[in-house]
Amino acid sequence: MDFSIKCVKSATKRSILISFYGSFHGTTYASTAISPVTSSMRRGLEPLVPSVYYSYFPDCLRCPMKQHYPECGIACFSTLEHLLQYVVDPDNVAGVFLEPIQGDAGVIVPPREYIVKLRSLCSEYNIPLIVDEIQTGLGRVGYWFAVNYFNIEPDLIVLGKSLGGGLPLSAIIGRAEIMDRWEGYAEMTSMAGHTLSCVAALANIEYIERNNLVEEAKRKGEYLRKRLLELKDKHDIVGDIRGLGLLYGVDIVKDKYSLNPDRKAALKIVWRAWELGLLTMTIGKYGNVIRIIPPLTITLEDLDRGVDILDQAIADVVKGRVDDRVLEFMRGW
């Protein structure tokens, strides 16, 4: 992500960066500045990169504006419009940085119209739109990229994690009029273009194509969603199921009436699931969302087994079969 920041700053000769509350773009110095997902990420590191501003991202379950979608008309979008009209000079904005689906915030999937309006607004002001597909790209959500689901074209796409097929590799894909305007040696690193990682990435992409894993992720994702919704209907502490393809979040709450996040229950469920043979983790702004992110090659049988274990783990926590003492072992999980 730091390189994408350098890229748009170099190309536009502008200084302001805009991101969204709940975003997670990494933990290096510049990417931390555009990642307001939790204050603990920046504790002791201030001041970070200057001239960074934030706007609301549509979290429709717990709307920061206390609205209800779709009746609200995506009211949260007005915060970005206000920012560009009254707070910053649009002609000095180097880029808007977006997770199309906010991963670490709790698998927050925005309404399609929000992303479409965002693309239109960036085009209107001639501001590059940089999309972070590190968690969502290469078939994870049932499309090659999440932007395909939203039917928009960004100016830059950032890839990583799955790109190298297990080896460390990241990449920036973008419009030539932006990429070709980098100056000097701003894009150089010692390990850039690492041969083994690049070979692995090519083999990985070929495997995805040859085995139709993007289409398989969509098909299996629909089945996974159906199974997870069964858990929501069954358990009062499952407040929401969110996701796309093979990326889902199970939102654990005190009860369905209040929808108050229950981090402790989520941690206990993760612990019990581990005891039963399922490895997962908690994420989210409140630490109460269980992330479901199986490999694209998973079978339906293993999906069933995983959801069954999660079902049992939730039931065991609800029945008080998991002692509070396990929370001591869950620090940093």
Image: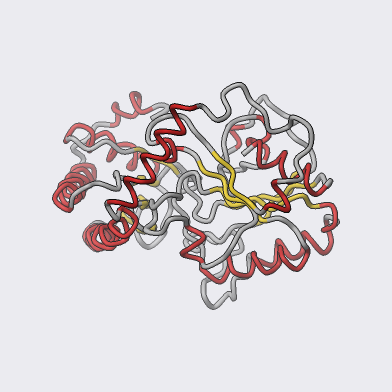
Q: Residue 183 or 315: which is nearer the viewer? A: 183
At 45% across and 50% down in the image, what residue appears?
136
Residue 229: x and y in percent read 27, 62
Residue 164: x and y in percent read 43, 35
Of the 4 image quadrants, the one containing the N terminus is top right
Q: Residue 134 or 239: which is nearer the viewer? A: 134
Furthest-top residue in view?
Answer: 190
Q: Above or below — where is 73 with respect to 50?
A: below
Residue 44: x and y in percent read 67, 24
At 27% across and 33% down in the image, what residue appears?
271
Residue 315: x and y in percent read 19, 47
Question: Is residue 278 visible in this depiction of the protein?
Answer: yes
At 27% across and 51% down in the image, what residue appears?
211
Q: Residue 130 or 247: which is nearer the viewer? A: 130
Q: Quadrant of residue 269?
A: top left
Q: Residue 330 or 144: which is nearer the viewer? A: 144
Q: Is residue 271 left or right of residue 139?
A: left
Q: Quadrant of residue 277?
A: top left
Q: Is residue 314 left or right of residue 12?
A: left
Of the 4 image quadrants, the one containing the C terminus is top left
At 35% across and 50% down in the image, what residue appears?
252
Q: Is residue 194 left or right of residue 53?
A: left
Q: Above or below — where is 73 with respect to 36?
A: below
Tally of numbered tags: 0
Q: How is the image coloured?
A: secondary structure
Q: Above or below — where is 174 with respect to 68?
A: above
Question: Is residue 253 visible in this depiction of the protein?
Answer: no
Q: Above or below — where is 137 with respect to 279?
A: below
